[in-house]
């Protein structure tokens, strides 16, 4: 299969999704590539999908949502909770 795109975006996090929306509005053929099972996965835990880190979720749930990088957040989140 051959696919032809004008723009390829690596990562379907908030920035990648917004880049894709901006690019497709310019009538480009856009491909967004994501290594995880779903796009925008981290948005689901952030203030009801509003990119707001202030949330009622348990700190462990937030840390786990960031995978192996979540341990980095644990210290900061526990200080302000």
Image (spheres, helix red, strand yellow):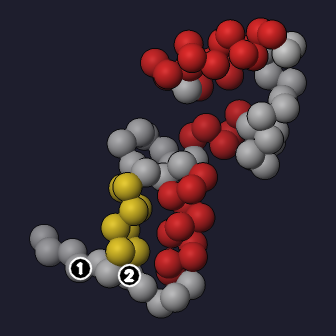
Residue at 48% from the left image edge and 52% from the top image edge: 12
Within-10-Å neighbours for mark 1: few <14, some 14–19, many 20+:
few
* Residue at screen point 60% across, 52% down: 14
Identity of the residue drawn at 38% across and 81% down: 29
Q: Quadrant of the C terminus?
A: top right
Asked whether the beta carbons under mark 2 and mark 1 sit within 8 Å of each other, the answer is: yes
Q: Residue 61 occupies which quadrant of the picture?
A: top right
Apparent side of residue 51 relative to residue 68 in the rendered image (left or right): right
The disc placed on residue 12 is none
Q: Seen in the image, is 51 located left or right of residue 73?
A: right
In this view of the protein, can residue 60 be seen by the observer? no
- SS type, badge 1: loop
Secondary structure state at the residue bearing disc 2? loop
Q: Nearer the viewer, residue 48 or 6?
A: 6
Q: Point out the tag, 2 or 1, that comes first from the N-terminus.
A: 1
Q: Which mark is residue 29?
A: 2
Task: Give the quarter of the image for residue 28.
Answer: bottom left
Q: Is residue 56 left or right of residue 19?
A: right
Residue 17 shows in the view: yes
The picture places residue 68, in percent across and down from the top left corner, at: 46, 18
> Can you identify the residue that label 1 sits on?
4
């Amino acid at each position: 299969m051959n696919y032809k795109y004008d723009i390829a975006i690596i990562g379907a996090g908030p920035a990648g999704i917004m880049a894709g929306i901006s690019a497709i509005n310019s009538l480009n053929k856009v491909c967004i590539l994501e290594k995880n099972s779903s796009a925008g996965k981290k948005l689901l835990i952030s203030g009801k999908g509003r990119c707001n880190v202030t949330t009622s979720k348990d700190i462990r749930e937030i840390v786990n949502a960031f995978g192996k990088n979540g341990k980095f957040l644990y210290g900061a989140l526990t200080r302000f909770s």
